[in-house]
Image (cartoon, rainbow, N blue to C red):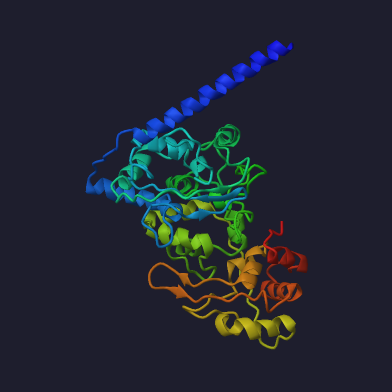
Protein backbone atom coordinates (compact mmCIF):
# COMPACT_ATOMS: atom_id res chain seq x y z
CA UNK A 1 0.00 0.00 0.00
CA UNK A 2 1.28 3.48 -0.86
CA UNK A 3 1.98 6.16 1.68
CA UNK A 4 -1.16 8.03 0.56
CA UNK A 5 -3.20 4.86 1.05
CA UNK A 6 -1.92 4.38 4.59
CA UNK A 7 -2.75 8.00 5.40
CA UNK A 8 -6.31 7.48 4.22
CA UNK A 9 -6.66 4.33 6.33
CA UNK A 10 -5.27 6.17 9.35
CA UNK A 11 -7.57 9.14 8.75
CA UNK A 12 -10.61 6.85 8.55
CA UNK A 13 -9.52 5.05 11.71
CA UNK A 14 -9.13 8.36 13.57
CA UNK A 15 -12.53 9.51 12.30
CA UNK A 16 -14.28 6.30 13.37
CA UNK A 17 -12.62 6.46 16.79
CA UNK A 18 -13.74 10.06 17.20
CA UNK A 19 -17.31 9.13 16.21
CA UNK A 20 -17.28 6.24 18.69
CA UNK A 21 -15.98 8.47 21.50
CA UNK A 22 -18.55 11.17 20.76
CA UNK A 23 -21.35 8.62 20.60
CA UNK A 24 -20.24 7.09 23.91
CA UNK A 25 -20.10 10.54 25.52
CA UNK A 26 -23.56 11.42 24.19
CA UNK A 27 -24.96 8.14 25.46
CA UNK A 28 -23.50 8.71 28.93
CA UNK A 29 -24.72 12.32 28.87
CA UNK A 30 -28.21 11.15 27.98
CA UNK A 31 -28.12 8.45 30.63
CA UNK A 32 -27.25 11.07 33.24
CA UNK A 33 -30.04 13.40 32.07
CA UNK A 34 -32.85 10.92 31.58
CA UNK A 35 -36.04 11.19 33.61
CA UNK A 36 -36.03 10.12 37.23
CA UNK A 37 -38.19 7.02 37.57
CA UNK A 38 -40.97 6.52 40.10
CA UNK A 39 -42.28 3.03 40.73
CA UNK A 40 -45.59 2.37 42.47
CA UNK A 41 -45.96 -1.04 44.06
CA UNK A 42 -48.33 -2.67 46.50
CA UNK A 43 -47.23 -3.98 49.91
CA UNK A 44 -47.53 -7.51 48.55
CA UNK A 45 -45.34 -6.70 45.54
CA UNK A 46 -42.74 -5.04 47.75
CA UNK A 47 -42.68 -8.06 50.08
CA UNK A 48 -42.08 -10.35 47.12
CA UNK A 49 -39.37 -8.03 45.81
CA UNK A 50 -37.65 -7.99 49.18
CA UNK A 51 -37.72 -11.78 49.36
CA UNK A 52 -36.19 -12.11 45.90
CA UNK A 53 -33.59 -9.46 46.71
CA UNK A 54 -32.58 -11.57 49.70
CA UNK A 55 -32.57 -14.75 47.60
CA UNK A 56 -30.34 -13.00 45.04
CA UNK A 57 -27.98 -11.95 47.86
CA UNK A 58 -27.86 -8.34 46.67
CA UNK A 59 -26.98 -6.84 50.06
CA UNK A 60 -23.76 -8.84 50.35
CA UNK A 61 -22.11 -6.86 47.55
CA UNK A 62 -24.07 -3.61 47.65
CA UNK A 63 -24.26 -2.82 51.39
CA UNK A 64 -20.94 -1.96 53.02
CA UNK A 65 -20.41 -2.82 56.71
CA UNK A 66 -21.91 0.06 58.67
CA UNK A 67 -23.12 1.71 55.47
CA UNK A 68 -26.58 2.59 54.21
CA UNK A 69 -28.53 -0.30 52.67
CA UNK A 70 -27.66 -0.85 48.99
CA UNK A 71 -25.51 2.30 48.79
CA UNK A 72 -22.47 0.34 47.60
CA UNK A 73 -18.86 0.47 48.66
CA UNK A 74 -18.20 -3.23 49.36
CA UNK A 75 -14.67 -4.16 48.24
CA UNK A 76 -14.69 -7.32 46.11
CA UNK A 77 -11.33 -8.98 45.58
CA UNK A 78 -10.58 -10.46 42.16
CA UNK A 79 -7.45 -11.73 40.39
CA UNK A 80 -7.55 -8.55 38.29
CA UNK A 81 -7.84 -6.03 41.13
CA UNK A 82 -10.36 -4.71 43.64
CA UNK A 83 -13.86 -3.98 42.39
CA UNK A 84 -16.42 -2.14 44.50
CA UNK A 85 -20.11 -2.90 44.71
CA UNK A 86 -22.09 0.02 43.32
CA UNK A 87 -24.90 2.17 44.65
CA UNK A 88 -28.23 0.57 43.69
CA UNK A 89 -30.51 2.88 45.67
CA UNK A 90 -32.97 5.12 43.74
CA UNK A 91 -30.54 8.06 43.81
CA UNK A 92 -30.59 9.52 40.27
CA UNK A 93 -26.95 10.63 40.20
CA UNK A 94 -25.09 7.72 41.79
CA UNK A 95 -27.67 4.93 41.90
CA UNK A 96 -30.36 3.49 39.64
CA UNK A 97 -32.90 6.32 39.97
CA UNK A 98 -33.03 6.86 36.19
CA UNK A 99 -33.19 3.16 35.31
CA UNK A 100 -36.38 1.79 33.84
CA UNK A 101 -37.39 -1.82 34.49
CA UNK A 102 -35.99 -2.65 31.04
CA UNK A 103 -32.69 -0.95 31.86
CA UNK A 104 -32.48 -2.84 35.13
CA UNK A 105 -33.19 -6.22 33.56
CA UNK A 106 -30.64 -5.53 30.82
CA UNK A 107 -27.96 -4.66 33.40
CA UNK A 108 -28.84 -7.65 35.54
CA UNK A 109 -28.85 -10.22 32.76
CA UNK A 110 -26.44 -8.76 30.20
CA UNK A 111 -23.94 -6.82 32.28
CA UNK A 112 -24.41 -3.45 30.59
CA UNK A 113 -25.27 -0.25 32.45
CA UNK A 114 -27.86 2.26 31.31
CA UNK A 115 -25.20 4.53 29.82
CA UNK A 116 -23.81 1.64 27.78
CA UNK A 117 -20.64 0.87 29.74
CA UNK A 118 -19.84 -2.76 30.48
CA UNK A 119 -20.12 -3.99 34.05
CA UNK A 120 -17.30 -6.07 35.48
CA UNK A 121 -18.17 -9.78 35.78
CA UNK A 122 -17.84 -9.43 39.56
CA UNK A 123 -21.48 -8.49 39.14
CA UNK A 124 -22.85 -12.01 38.52
CA UNK A 125 -24.74 -11.26 35.32
CA UNK A 126 -23.40 -14.50 33.85
CA UNK A 127 -25.52 -16.34 36.44
CA UNK A 128 -28.39 -13.85 36.29
CA UNK A 129 -28.79 -14.35 32.54
CA UNK A 130 -31.51 -16.89 33.27
CA UNK A 131 -33.43 -14.78 35.79
CA UNK A 132 -37.20 -14.70 35.22
CA UNK A 133 -38.31 -11.28 33.99
CA UNK A 134 -41.04 -11.09 36.64
CA UNK A 135 -38.41 -11.69 39.33
CA UNK A 136 -36.16 -8.98 37.91
CA UNK A 137 -39.11 -6.56 37.86
CA UNK A 138 -40.00 -7.41 41.47
CA UNK A 139 -36.42 -6.78 42.65
CA UNK A 140 -36.39 -3.51 40.68
CA UNK A 141 -39.66 -2.36 42.26
CA UNK A 142 -38.37 -3.14 45.75
CA UNK A 143 -35.06 -1.32 45.26
CA UNK A 144 -36.76 1.70 43.70
CA UNK A 145 -38.91 2.04 46.82
CA UNK A 146 -35.94 2.12 49.20
CA UNK A 147 -34.44 5.39 50.51
CA UNK A 148 -32.26 7.10 47.92
CA UNK A 149 -28.69 7.60 49.15
CA UNK A 150 -26.51 10.21 47.42
CA UNK A 151 -23.29 8.26 47.93
CA UNK A 152 -20.77 8.33 45.06
CA UNK A 153 -19.47 5.01 43.84
CA UNK A 154 -15.93 4.15 44.89
CA UNK A 155 -13.17 3.99 42.31
CA UNK A 156 -12.14 0.47 41.33
CA UNK A 157 -8.57 -0.77 41.61
CA UNK A 158 -8.43 -2.76 38.38
CA UNK A 159 -5.11 -2.53 36.57
CA UNK A 160 -4.42 -2.09 32.84
CA UNK A 161 -5.56 -3.59 30.51
CA UNK A 162 -8.47 -4.99 32.54
CA UNK A 163 -9.70 -1.48 33.32
CA UNK A 164 -10.66 -0.97 29.67
CA UNK A 165 -14.34 -1.75 29.96
CA UNK A 166 -14.98 -1.98 26.24
CA UNK A 167 -12.81 -5.09 26.22
CA UNK A 168 -15.34 -6.81 28.50
CA UNK A 169 -17.67 -7.00 25.50
CA UNK A 170 -15.22 -9.44 23.91
CA UNK A 171 -15.05 -11.41 27.17
CA UNK A 172 -18.84 -11.59 27.16
CA UNK A 173 -18.89 -12.90 23.59
CA UNK A 174 -16.46 -15.62 24.53
CA UNK A 175 -17.65 -16.61 28.00
CA UNK A 176 -20.95 -15.07 29.10
CA UNK A 177 -23.27 -17.16 26.95
CA UNK A 178 -25.12 -20.30 27.93
CA UNK A 179 -27.23 -20.43 31.07
CA UNK A 180 -30.22 -22.72 30.98
CA UNK A 181 -28.24 -25.21 28.91
CA UNK A 182 -25.26 -25.17 31.31
CA UNK A 183 -24.30 -28.43 32.99
CA UNK A 184 -26.22 -28.88 36.26
CA UNK A 185 -24.25 -29.74 39.38
CA UNK A 186 -26.48 -32.70 40.24
CA UNK A 187 -28.98 -35.05 38.67
CA UNK A 188 -32.71 -34.62 39.09
CA UNK A 189 -36.03 -33.68 37.52
CA UNK A 190 -38.44 -33.18 40.44
CA UNK A 191 -40.18 -29.81 40.96
CA UNK A 192 -38.04 -29.27 44.07
CA UNK A 193 -34.85 -30.02 42.11
CA UNK A 194 -35.83 -27.55 39.36
CA UNK A 195 -36.70 -24.85 41.88
CA UNK A 196 -33.47 -25.53 43.72
CA UNK A 197 -31.45 -25.22 40.54
CA UNK A 198 -32.95 -21.78 39.90
CA UNK A 199 -32.23 -20.69 43.46
CA UNK A 200 -28.66 -22.04 43.50
CA UNK A 201 -27.48 -21.41 39.94
CA UNK A 202 -29.40 -18.24 39.05
CA UNK A 203 -30.64 -16.20 42.01
CA UNK A 204 -28.09 -17.38 44.57
CA UNK A 205 -25.32 -17.45 41.91
CA UNK A 206 -23.43 -19.96 44.07
CA UNK A 207 -21.22 -21.00 41.17
CA UNK A 208 -19.63 -17.55 41.04
CA UNK A 209 -17.61 -18.55 44.11
CA UNK A 210 -17.87 -22.34 44.22
CA UNK A 211 -17.06 -23.16 40.57
CA UNK A 212 -13.46 -23.22 39.32
CA UNK A 213 -12.43 -20.56 36.81
CA UNK A 214 -10.26 -20.55 33.72
CA UNK A 215 -7.31 -18.40 32.66
CA UNK A 216 -9.54 -15.41 31.77
CA UNK A 217 -11.63 -15.62 34.92
CA UNK A 218 -14.47 -17.45 33.19
CA UNK A 219 -16.52 -20.10 34.95
CA UNK A 220 -15.58 -23.65 34.02
CA UNK A 221 -19.08 -24.75 33.08
CA UNK A 222 -18.11 -28.41 32.85
CA UNK A 223 -17.23 -28.39 36.58
CA UNK A 224 -20.12 -26.60 38.29
CA UNK A 225 -19.76 -26.10 42.05
CA UNK A 226 -16.57 -28.20 42.12
CA UNK A 227 -14.74 -25.68 44.34
CA UNK A 228 -12.48 -22.67 43.89
CA UNK A 229 -9.47 -21.59 45.97
CA UNK A 230 -8.30 -18.67 43.83
CA UNK A 231 -10.73 -15.86 44.73
CA UNK A 232 -9.96 -15.10 48.36
CA UNK A 233 -7.92 -16.10 51.37
CA UNK A 234 -10.38 -18.87 52.14
CA UNK A 235 -11.37 -21.42 49.51
CA UNK A 236 -14.95 -22.01 48.38
CA UNK A 237 -15.23 -25.80 48.79
CA UNK A 238 -16.59 -28.43 46.43
CA UNK A 239 -20.38 -28.51 46.95
CA UNK A 240 -21.25 -31.09 44.32
CA UNK A 241 -23.20 -34.10 45.64
CA UNK A 242 -20.02 -36.18 45.65
CA UNK A 243 -17.96 -33.47 47.34
CA UNK A 244 -20.56 -32.90 50.05
CA UNK A 245 -21.09 -36.61 50.71
CA UNK A 246 -17.33 -37.22 50.99
CA UNK A 247 -17.22 -34.72 53.87
CA UNK A 248 -20.19 -36.30 55.63
CA UNK A 249 -22.96 -33.90 54.59
CA UNK A 250 -26.51 -35.26 54.40
CA UNK A 251 -29.75 -33.40 53.65
CA UNK A 252 -30.54 -32.54 57.28
CA UNK A 253 -27.04 -31.17 57.95
CA UNK A 254 -26.97 -29.16 54.73
CA UNK A 255 -30.42 -27.67 55.23
CA UNK A 256 -29.57 -26.70 58.80
CA UNK A 257 -26.36 -25.04 57.67
CA UNK A 258 -28.17 -22.94 55.04
CA UNK A 259 -30.78 -21.90 57.60
CA UNK A 260 -28.54 -21.11 60.56
CA UNK A 261 -24.89 -21.30 59.51
CA UNK A 262 -24.20 -23.75 62.33
CA UNK A 263 -24.12 -27.56 62.38
CA UNK A 264 -21.77 -30.24 63.65
CA UNK A 265 -20.23 -30.25 60.16
CA UNK A 266 -19.31 -26.58 59.97
CA UNK A 267 -19.79 -23.01 61.14
CA UNK A 268 -20.32 -20.54 58.32
CA UNK A 269 -17.27 -18.29 58.01
CA UNK A 270 -15.88 -15.51 55.85
CA UNK A 271 -18.07 -14.70 52.82
CA UNK A 272 -20.35 -17.69 53.44
CA UNK A 273 -21.30 -16.25 56.81
CA UNK A 274 -22.49 -13.11 55.01
CA UNK A 275 -24.47 -15.26 52.57
CA UNK A 276 -26.20 -17.10 55.40
CA UNK A 277 -26.96 -13.96 57.41
CA UNK A 278 -28.24 -11.86 54.51
CA UNK A 279 -29.69 -14.48 52.21
CA UNK A 280 -30.25 -18.17 52.91
CA UNK A 281 -31.38 -17.74 56.54
CA UNK A 282 -34.23 -15.56 55.23
CA UNK A 283 -35.62 -18.11 52.78
CA UNK A 284 -38.75 -20.16 53.26
CA UNK A 285 -38.58 -23.76 54.40
CA UNK A 286 -39.74 -24.89 50.96
CA UNK A 287 -36.94 -23.00 49.22
CA UNK A 288 -34.33 -24.30 51.67
CA UNK A 289 -35.58 -27.82 50.96
CA UNK A 290 -35.35 -27.11 47.22
CA UNK A 291 -31.76 -25.86 47.48
CA UNK A 292 -30.82 -28.93 49.48
CA UNK A 293 -32.49 -31.18 46.92
CA UNK A 294 -30.59 -29.60 44.06
CA UNK A 295 -27.21 -29.61 45.81
CA UNK A 296 -27.48 -33.31 46.64
CA UNK A 297 -29.64 -34.41 43.69
CA UNK A 298 -32.95 -36.26 43.65
CA UNK A 299 -31.02 -39.39 44.67
CA UNK A 300 -28.35 -38.15 47.11
CA UNK A 301 -25.15 -40.17 47.49
CA UNK A 302 -24.65 -41.73 50.90
CA UNK A 303 -22.77 -39.45 53.26
CA UNK A 304 -19.40 -40.81 54.34
CA UNK A 305 -19.40 -42.11 57.89
CA UNK A 306 -17.54 -40.23 60.60
CA UNK A 307 -14.69 -42.06 62.31
CA UNK A 308 -14.28 -41.01 65.93
CA UNK A 309 -10.85 -41.51 67.46
CA UNK A 310 -10.33 -40.41 71.03
CA UNK A 311 -7.30 -38.33 72.02
CA UNK A 312 -6.91 -40.27 75.23
CA UNK A 313 -3.37 -41.57 75.68
CA UNK A 314 -2.04 -39.90 72.54
CA UNK A 315 1.31 -38.16 72.62
CA UNK A 316 3.67 -36.38 70.25
CA UNK A 317 4.42 -32.79 69.24
CA UNK A 318 1.19 -32.29 67.29
CA UNK A 319 -0.95 -33.48 70.19
CA UNK A 320 1.01 -31.29 72.62
CA UNK A 321 0.47 -28.26 70.38
CA UNK A 322 -3.22 -29.05 70.21
CA UNK A 323 -3.42 -29.41 73.98
CA UNK A 324 -1.54 -26.14 74.56
CA UNK A 325 -3.09 -23.97 71.84
CA UNK A 326 -6.44 -25.44 70.83
CA UNK A 327 -8.00 -27.61 73.53
CA UNK A 328 -9.02 -24.69 75.73
CA UNK A 329 -11.67 -23.70 73.16
CA UNK A 330 -12.22 -26.79 70.99
CA UNK A 331 -12.24 -29.28 73.87
CA UNK A 332 -9.69 -31.84 74.98
CA UNK A 333 -11.21 -34.45 72.67
CA UNK A 334 -11.98 -31.99 69.82
CA UNK A 335 -15.67 -32.09 70.73
CA UNK A 336 -16.07 -28.30 70.67
CA UNK A 337 -17.67 -25.96 73.19
CA UNK A 338 -21.18 -24.54 72.53
CA UNK A 339 -21.19 -20.78 71.81
CA UNK A 340 -17.40 -20.74 71.95
CA UNK A 341 -15.79 -22.92 69.27
CA UNK A 342 -16.95 -25.61 66.82
CA UNK A 343 -16.13 -29.27 67.21
CA UNK A 344 -13.37 -30.64 65.00
CA UNK A 345 -14.19 -34.36 65.00
CA UNK A 346 -16.86 -34.04 62.30
CA UNK A 347 -15.77 -30.69 60.87
CA UNK A 348 -16.12 -30.36 57.11
CA UNK A 349 -12.98 -28.26 56.65
CA UNK A 350 -10.92 -30.78 58.62
CA UNK A 351 -12.21 -33.65 56.49
CA UNK A 352 -11.88 -31.84 53.14
CA UNK A 353 -9.47 -33.43 50.67
CA UNK A 354 -8.06 -29.91 50.21
CA UNK A 355 -6.56 -28.73 53.55
CA UNK A 356 -6.53 -25.09 52.38
CA UNK A 357 -9.11 -23.69 54.82
CA UNK A 358 -7.85 -25.65 57.80
CA UNK A 359 -4.31 -24.36 57.27
CA UNK A 360 -5.47 -20.75 56.78
CA UNK A 361 -7.56 -20.93 59.96
CA UNK A 362 -4.54 -22.17 61.95
CA UNK A 363 -2.28 -19.49 60.49
CA UNK A 364 -4.64 -16.49 60.46
CA UNK A 365 -7.29 -17.32 63.03
CA UNK A 366 -10.94 -16.33 62.63
CA UNK A 367 -12.98 -13.32 63.74
CA UNK A 368 -15.97 -13.57 66.04
CA UNK A 369 -18.90 -15.22 64.29
CA UNK A 370 -22.18 -13.32 64.54
CA UNK A 371 -24.62 -15.97 63.36
CA UNK A 372 -28.37 -15.60 62.67
CA UNK A 373 -30.48 -15.38 65.80
CA UNK A 374 -28.63 -15.22 69.11
CA UNK A 375 -25.85 -17.70 68.30
CA UNK A 376 -22.22 -16.55 68.52
CA UNK A 377 -18.80 -18.12 68.21
CA UNK A 378 -15.77 -16.50 69.80
CA UNK A 379 -12.83 -15.18 67.82
CA UNK A 380 -9.94 -17.57 67.21
CA UNK A 381 -6.33 -16.29 67.33
CA UNK A 382 -3.92 -17.15 64.56
CA UNK A 383 -0.80 -19.15 65.30
CA UNK A 384 1.44 -18.12 62.41
CA UNK A 385 3.90 -16.57 64.89
CA UNK A 386 3.82 -19.56 67.25
CA UNK A 387 4.17 -22.47 64.83
CA UNK A 388 6.55 -22.99 61.92
CA UNK A 389 5.52 -24.68 58.67
CA UNK A 390 6.41 -28.16 59.90
CA UNK A 391 4.49 -27.72 63.13
CA UNK A 392 1.40 -26.41 61.31
CA UNK A 393 1.58 -29.29 58.82
CA UNK A 394 1.87 -31.87 61.62
CA UNK A 395 -0.98 -30.32 63.61
CA UNK A 396 -3.23 -30.22 60.53
CA UNK A 397 -2.29 -33.79 59.62
CA UNK A 398 -3.00 -34.97 63.16
CA UNK A 399 -6.42 -33.31 63.10
CA UNK A 400 -7.25 -34.88 59.72
CA UNK A 401 -6.09 -38.43 60.48
CA UNK A 402 -7.29 -40.96 59.52
CA UNK A 403 -10.03 -39.36 57.41
CA UNK A 404 -7.92 -37.30 55.03
CA UNK A 405 -4.42 -37.21 53.59
CA UNK A 406 -1.58 -35.64 55.60
CA UNK A 407 -0.40 -32.09 54.93
CA UNK A 408 3.09 -31.28 53.70
CA UNK A 409 5.27 -28.35 54.76
CA UNK A 410 5.33 -26.85 51.27
CA UNK A 411 1.56 -26.40 51.21
CA UNK A 412 1.74 -24.51 54.50
CA UNK A 413 4.63 -22.36 53.26
CA UNK A 414 2.70 -21.24 50.18
CA UNK A 415 -0.39 -20.36 52.17
CA UNK A 416 1.70 -18.52 54.75
CA UNK A 417 2.89 -16.29 51.92
CA UNK A 418 -0.70 -15.70 50.85
CA UNK A 419 -0.55 -17.89 47.78
CA UNK A 420 -2.80 -20.76 46.82
CA UNK A 421 -1.20 -24.14 47.19
CA UNK A 422 -2.53 -25.16 43.77
In the image, residue 153 lies at what x, y percent?
A: 44, 48
User: Quick one: quadrant of the C terminus?
Assistant: bottom right
Using the rendered view, name the quadrant where residue 220 is placed: top right
Question: Considering depth in this image, is 144 or 135 the residue closer to the camera?
Answer: 144
In the picture provided, is 164 more to the left or to the right than 386?
A: left
Does 225 appear above or below 388? above
Q: Residue at x 59, y 74 (%)?
A: 344
Residue 274 drawn at (x, y percent): 46, 60
Q: Residue 30, image x and y in percent?
A: 38, 30
The image shows residue 41 at horizontal and vertical percentages of: 24, 43
Which of the 4 image quadrants contains residue 11?
A: top right
Residue at image location 58% in from the left, 70% down from the top: 347
Count of numbered tags: 0
Q: Is residue 245 visible?
A: yes
Up-down: is 192 above or below 276? Answer: above
From the viewer's perspective, is 29 left or right of 227? left
Considering every residue shown, the one lying at the far bottom of the view is: 313
User: Which residue is nearer to you in this view: 189 or 152?
Assistant: 152
Choose between 61 and 299: the one closer to the eye: 61
268 or 251, nearer to the observer = 268
The answer to whether one can see residue 333 in this image is no
Residue 115 occupies quadrant: top left
Image quadrant holding the N terminus, namely top right
Q: Horizontal placement of 261 versus 81: left or right?
A: left
Amino acid sequence: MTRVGWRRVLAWAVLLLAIWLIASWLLQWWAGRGPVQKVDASAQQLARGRYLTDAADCAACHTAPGGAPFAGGVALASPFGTIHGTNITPDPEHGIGRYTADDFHHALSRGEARDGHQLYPAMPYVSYRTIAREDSDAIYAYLMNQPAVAQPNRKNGVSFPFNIRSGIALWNLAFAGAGADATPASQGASPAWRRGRYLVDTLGHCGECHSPRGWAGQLKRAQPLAGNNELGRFAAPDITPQGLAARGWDAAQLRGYLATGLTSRAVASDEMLTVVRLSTSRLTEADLDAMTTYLLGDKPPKAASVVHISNAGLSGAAHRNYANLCAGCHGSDREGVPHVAPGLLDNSSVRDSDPHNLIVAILDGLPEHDLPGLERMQAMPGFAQDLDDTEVARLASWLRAPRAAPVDDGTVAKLRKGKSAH
